[in-house]
Image (spheres, rainbow, N blue to C red):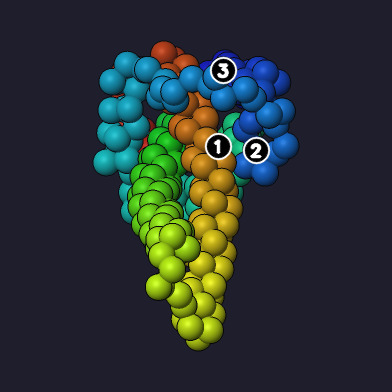
Amino acid sequence: MNSARICAFVLVALLFAACPAQLHPQGQAKPKNPREEKPWQQAVVPAEVVKFGADLEGAASAHLKDWCSNYVRKELRDKPIEPKAVIGAVDRHYAAASDLARDAGIYLVYYLAYRDDEENQRMLSFRIRDIDRETYDITRELAMIHESELNRLASRNSSLTPAERIRRDEQEQKANSRLRELGDERQIKGTRMDFSRKKVNIYLKLMSYAYDRMKGTPPAVLDELK
């Protein structure tokens, strides 16, 4: 294992040691005081770090891109990051290539995984916004039902028939049930969003450390990965 790979592995090992529960989508992290929560910020890395990944993608053969994309989908999506496993997978699959070519292949896997989690965040954000809109609409509907009931109670000449009361109760029960479903789904989506954001930052840091040792490497080195 060359120095660039060792450095990348040690970096993430330290990150996992600092917050192992927070980096697993179903881990039971210690509850936090909402006042202590800080708005999420994406890790800041030089633009060249991401550009080099894009250049590698542009230079990669269709076969290599397919292999990397399938690996990301099957082995990295919705899972904690394990740099040692990524290094081993590339080394085994492209054992005949040089260390530099395999390092570039590993970089490409990290870049595609970073892009995958960015897309995952985008889709989760869309769904969370849809959940919030539906929750708002149902909450307004329930408020109108309660307001209507209060107005009827205040009026001596207004009352519901038994059939109307049954329909109203069913409507209210259905709305409350849907609110519970939406609340549960939003909590799950929020947990996945938090997990995906952490992964994006780790991938950016991995690429940043690797780029310091690989800058100047021609993307055409990927031609060795056949």
Looking at the rendered image, the disc whose residue lies closer to the viewer, 1 or 3, is 3
x, y percent for residue 48? 29, 20
User: Mark 1 vs mark 3: which is more N-terminal?
Assistant: 3
Q: CA distance from mark 3 to mark 2?
A: 20 Å
x, y percent for residue 95? 57, 41
User: Mark 1 vs mark 2: which is more N-terminal?
Assistant: 2
Q: Circle 3 sits on which residue?
A: 36
- Secondary structure at badge 2 equals loop
Query: Is 16 left or right of 110, judged from the image as shown?
Result: right
Instruction: Please give the name of the residue rendered at 28% of the width and 20% of the height, measured from the top-left corner.
Output: 47
Q: Quadrant of the N terminus?
A: top right
**Residue 196 versus residue 213 in the image, above or below:** below
The answer to whether the residue labelled 1 contacts the one labelled 3, judged by CB atoms less than 8 Å apart, is no
- Secondary structure at badge 3 equals helix
Looking at the rendered image, the disc whose residue lies closer to the viewer, 3 or 2, is 3
**Amino acid type, callout 1:** Phe
